[in-house]
Amino acid sequence: MSGWSGQVNRAREFLFEDSLLTYDYDLFVIGAGSGGVRASRISSSFGAKVAIAEEYRVGGTCVIRGCVPKKLFVYASHFSDDFEDAKNFGWTVPKAKHDWKTLIRNKDTEIDRLNGIYYTILENNNVELFEARAEILDKNTVKVGDKTFTAKYILIATGGIPIMPDVPGIEHAISSNEAFYLEEMPKRVVIVGGGYIAVEFAGIFNGLGADVIQLYRGEQILRGFDHHVQAMVAQEITKKGVDLRVRSNPAKIEKTANGLLVTLEDGSTIETDAVMYATGRRPNTEGMGLEKVGVELKANGAVIVDELSKTSVDNIYAVGDVTDRIALTPVAIHEGMAFAETVFANKPRAFKHSDVPSAVFSQPPVGSVGLTEAEARAEYGDVDIYKSEFRPMKQTLTLGSERAMVKLIVEPTSDRVLGVHIVGADAGEIIQGIGIALKCGATKEQFDATVGVHPTLAEEIVTMREKYTGE
Ligand code: NDP
């Protein structure tokens, strides 16, 4: 017996031997986001009796107020560039006008549709859903609303929530949660932060026609990314009109007759219509009774887990953003599947948090996988760098000045490619395939032996022969 059916049968034998009948459920999942839903449905497919609790909307941050609506907003905002670019390809484009309410309405319809799909997934997989806040009473007991249930295993998958720093007037600011539901599109926006969300929303509001000022407290945005990616994105978003101010941070925010007045730490002021904070997210663990049952947390509230996603309490596991490992939906999904196999298929599997490809949907977007140059140098000493910066073909007929970049980091002894970083159109799409190559341990020689697809941005990945020796 092999494959999925073999696993399911082994799982059933395992469950039967373990006689789980003394509990209401084999598994109670708290949080119906990407990680929780995947874990519950796979566990159920292994024969476990599963319940899931969700206090907000089934689907989680990514579907309801994260990746999905964000990407729709990115598409919406990109049209302003597209209309401009079209002119030199021979199109006559009348003055385009954007209607924010239409975007919000259509986005809401799509999110409702996806929300419905998640209900169906749970139903079709015999996962019982409780739409209420859950609290852990003891290691086998969960309180949901006014009901109490017992479960052999509990999985915490409650995700994260935006951090709003303690700045005077912060109550006038919004986070990405509210940005998806604004009644009106602000004409002037101040965005605070230099991470994924800040950069993505700076591009969204800028593309939709707002005057955007992005404030970042440090020297260079996108901390943790390869330094050439950081510099390239900062340069390109500035060229597109985002007023990026580094070493800048609000000291206070006040409401005025004309909107909001932001006073910066250096004393200067900005008048704006909206202030959006994208200053990180923290694990959503407050008031869940975790400390009471002995689940150890990090100082920032993250659930501490081992490589099998087990907490300090033997039958309680945690996956996704709440564990503060890599806060990405596909990672939470993999952790959820590995959990289900470990616990309900008697097949312990640790998900490896390395070579995880990711994209930043800035404009232009970023695709990255593997090590940054700095990480590679720290781990391997000398590394070879291949870097190409160029004007993408589409731009040759447009008035745009957008540039693209492809960078490879190679370990010279083994010739293994350690990292690939792309800035340019469709970088997120391209990096997915490169992620497979890195997972397979591909060498630079194998990259070079791969025939390029012409004419594309991606062909640069397999055509760079000269080592880059600059900074
Ligand atoms: P990030 O951690 O990426 O960035 C937070 C930013 O806010 C940093 O620039 C940080 O500065 C700054 N910051 C933190 N605290 C303060 C403060 N008190 N005052 C001023 N600035 C501050 O968080 P995001 O909120 O952008 O995103 C959260 C996570 O969600 C990401 O890490 C990512 O994993 C995930 N995500 C992924 C996306 C994708 O895959 N495309 C899209 C959106 C989110 P400093 O650098 O100095 O610490």
Image: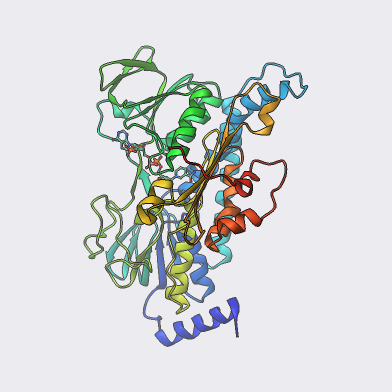
Q: Which of 277 and 20 is in front in this view?
A: 277
Q: Residue furthest top?
A: 257
Residue at the far right in the pictured view? 90
Task: Tell me where residue 185 appears, x and y as whole percent.
Answer: 51, 24
**In the rendering, at what x and y percent does residue 14 appear?**
45, 84
From the viewer's perspective, tell me whether residue 424 is left or right of residue 311: right
**Residue 362 located left or right of residue 454:** left
Whether residue 133 is visible here, answered yes or no, is no
Report whether residue 174 is seen: yes
Q: Which residue lies furthest to the bottom in this view?
A: 17
Q: In this view, does 112 lie above or below 208?
A: below
The correct choice, above or below, for 225 with respect to 139 in the image is: above
Residue 162 image position (x, y, % from top left): 36, 41
The residue that appears at 58% across and 28% down in the rendered structure is: 402
State how many labels appear. 0
Q: Which residue shows up at 46% across the image and 77% down it?
A: 347
Q: In which quarter of the image is the C terminus?
A: top left
Quadrant in which ligand 1 is drawn: top left
Q: Which residue is drawn at 62% across and 44% down?
A: 460
Residue 150 horizontal side relative to residue 85, left or right: left
Image quarter where the N terminus lies is: bottom right
Indicate the colouring scheme. rainbow
Residue 112 relative to residue 175: left or right: right
**Position of 166 relative to 25 (above/below):** above
Spot occupied by residue 108 in the image (x, y as percentages of width and height): 56, 39
- Residue under the image location 27 percent in, 64 percent down: 137
Between residue 330 and residue 133, name the one nearer to us: 330
